[in-house]
Image (spheres, rainbow, N blue to C red):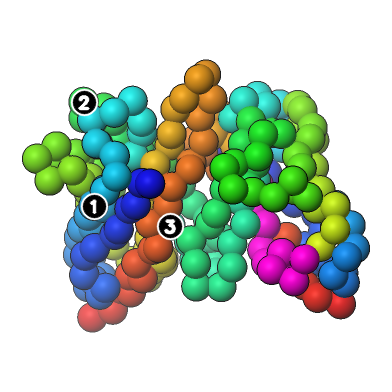
Amino acid sequence: EIVLTQSPGTLSLSPGDRATLSCRASQSVSGYYFAWLQQKPGQAPRPLIYGASSRAPGIPDRFSGSGSGTEFTLTISRLEPEDFAVYYCQQYGSSTPVTFGQGTRLEIK
Amino acid sequence: QVQLQESGPGLVKPSGTLSLFCSVSGDSISTNNWWNWVRQSPERGLEWIGEVYHTGTTIYNPSLESRVSMSVDDSKNQFSLTLSDVSAADAAVYFCARRHRFNWNEYFDSWGPGTRVSVSS
């Protein structure tokens, strides 16, 4: 299976800052089948980005995704208070089990 | 707007069988989507269990394949998960989710709120 490794494990920033989260895959992933999810305590994961760079409906444009192959990035241009949460990357290629990264916790500095 | 809701016992005995259901509203389960189960625990993080298509076709995580079964009930617009021979390692929050396929794209667009399952005698 494809292992996704996220960095950093924890990111401490202030509202208004720019956040850059990384996800590295153990082997090449099709961008069509790569997503970023946000999860807040006690809630289900919420899709933010699919297809590596397309925003899901209702997601603000301060969220953007990029990357290909084995390196993907989620960028939040200006952090809002509601953005402090845990973020997961996910790959769901057709010929391999769906896997998730271990998560990056974005906390208020 | 699609909504998913998990249901089932919150407590299962060791070596017993876990059975969960996911009710779907706002979409027919017979559309061109895959219906998934994902679980989450502090020890294992988010773990994909498998998915089922409305025809009954299933794809399971190889790590769980020997103990997992999924099915669809068109009449109730719901799908189900059965996990046999459970142990403490199966204690987790279980989510159902839709893998939505549209315009040559697909992603896990809708998730249930999750149901916590404990394993204890």
Disc 3 and disc 1 in contact, CB within 8 angstroms: no
According to the picture, the residue beneath numbered tag 1 turns out to be B23
Residue type at tag 2: Thr
Marks 2, 3 in one chain = yes
Spatial separation of the CA atoms under disc 2 and disc 1: 17 Å
Q: Secondary structure at mark 1?
A: strand
Asked if the magenta segment contains residue A82, the reply would be: yes
- Percent position of residue A41, x then y: 56, 73
Tell me which corner region of the image, top left, top right, bottom left or bottom right, holds residue B36.
Answer: top left
Q: Residues within 10 Å of mark 1 (few under 14, many from 20)?
A: some
Spatial separation of the CA atoms under disc 3 and disc 1: 17 Å
Q: Residues within 10 Å of mark 2 (few under 14, many from 20)?
A: few
Sequence order check, earlier mark of 3 and 1: 1
According to the picture, the residue beneath numbered tag 2 turns out to be B55
- Percent position of residue A109, x then y: 86, 77
**Numbered disc 2: what chain?**
B
Sequence order check, earlier mark of 2 and 3: 3
According to the picture, the residue beneath numbered tag 3 turns out to be B39
Which residues are the magenta region? A80-90
Tell me which corner region of the image, top left, top right, bottom left or bottom right, holds residue A99.
Answer: top right
Marks 2, 1 in one chain = yes
Could you say which is closer to the camera, residue B35 or residue B86?
B35
Residue type at tag 3: Arg
- Percent position of residue A98, x then y: 51, 38
